[in-house]
Image (tube, rainbow, N blue to C red):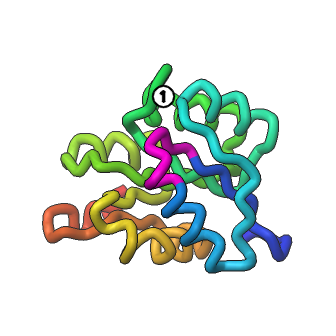
Amino acid sequence: MAAASSIRVMVVEDFQPFRRFVTSKLEQRPELQVVCEVSDGLQAVEKAEELKPDLVLLDIGLPTITGIEAAQRILGFAPGSKIIFATQETSPEFVEEAMRLGAWGYVFKKYAKRDLLLAIDAVLSGERFVSSNGVHRGLSDTL
């Protein structure tokens, strides 16, 4: 967990209703401070370079560049930022690629109500997190 009492979070999601859901979940936790909300991949890279957030909640399917590409760029200049993907992409290939490139968490949108804050807690405690639907159990143990 970051030393400061506040964890600076950037939310990257192009679907506004889901972005609103994410920020409302984050507001339940006073230590989580949303410092920026953006809706496309290039904006995410620019804002992350400027703000160097502690945590980036990132969709994969974004306009301009994918969340995967945005994450690679962000980790290039802000390796201390922890990335959690929150996406509808549930295939093992997406999960493995995201975790291999350095993401700390992967939350399936359909389980976000249950898993989002669990993922954040795990990641801020130094653990990796992948939503479980029975298919990906144990994936993070191999990384």
Can residue 126 be seen in the rendering of this structure? no
Report the side of 115 relative to 94 (left or right): right
Dot 1 amino acid type: Glu
> 88 above or below 61?
below
Farthest residue to the right: give it: 4
Task: Left or right? Give the position of 43 relative to 84.
Answer: right
* Image point (42%, 54%), residue name: 86
Residue at position x 39%, y 44% in the image: 98
Query: Residue 113 appears at what percent x and percent y?
Result: 39, 72
Q: How many marks?
A: 1
Secondary structure state at the residue bearing disc 1 = helix
Camera-side residue of 138 and 82: 82
Pick whichever, 140 or 39, lies toward us. 39
Magenta-highlighted residues: 12-19
Q: Residue furthest front?
A: 17
Q: Is residue 123 visible?
A: yes
Does residue 66 appear left or right of residue 39 in this picture? Answer: left
What residue sits right under mark 1 in the picture? 69
